[in-house]
Amino acid sequence: MTKLEVIEIAKNESEIQDWPWIEPILIKKQKQYFVFGKTIWRVMTNSESRGGNINILIEDKTGKIIQKAFAKR
């Protein structure tokens, strides 16, 4: 997956959940469980502030959302 595809998936989910999409955005590609794990993307909105953050984990191969949360505070 590309960063643009990951952003699109995360943005669509934020609209579905009616969560505010606030920039700047932090995007990281990382391995879970070291050697044998899946590669995931982590997306965090409003990354320079505490609160108002959307956190979404997306599996790299499938584009499936593994975890999602919104921190209001």
Image (cartoon, rainbow, N blue to C red):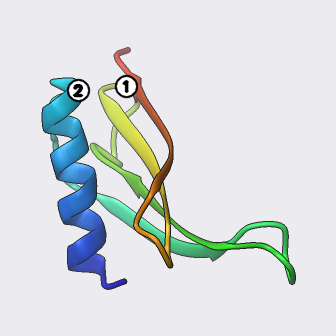
Mark 2 in CB contact with mark 1 (< 8 angstroms)? no
Mark 2 nearby-residue class (10 Å; few <14, some 14–19, many ≥20) = few
Give me the disc on residue 19: none
Residue 49 sits above or below residue 24 on the image: above
Which numbered disc flags the more N-terminal residue, 2 or 1? 2
Q: Nearer the viewer, mark 2 or mark 1?
A: 2
Please tell me which residue lies in front, 63 or 27: 63
Q: Disc 2 marks which amino acid?
A: Gln
Disc 2 target residue: 17
Across and down, in percent, residue 47 comes to: 35, 48
The image quarter containing residue 53 is top left
Q: Is residue 44 left or right of residue 39?
A: left
- Residue 37 falls in image quadrant: bottom right
Residue with the mark numbered 1 = 51
Check the image and report above or below for 50 versus 40.
above
Percent of width and height locating residue 71: 41, 23
Q: Quadrant of the N terminus?
A: bottom left
Give the residue drawn at x 50%, y 78%: 61
Residue most toward the front?
A: 62
- In the displayed image of the protein, which residue is found farthest to the top? 73
Count of numbered labels shown in the rendering:
2
Q: CA distance from mark 2 to mark 1?
A: 17 Å
The relative height of residue 1 versus residue 66 in the rendered view (above or below) is below
Type of residue at label 1?
Answer: Gly
The residue carrying pointer 1 sits among few (fewer than 14), some (14 to 19) or many (20 or more) residues within 10 Å by Cα, namely few
Could you say whether the residue bearing mark 1 is in a helix, strand or loop? loop
Circle 2 — which element?
helix
Can you give x and y, in whole percent of width and height, for residue 73 in the image? 38, 14
Left or right of residue 30, residue 61 in this image: left
Q: Residue at x 18, y 50 (%)?
A: 11
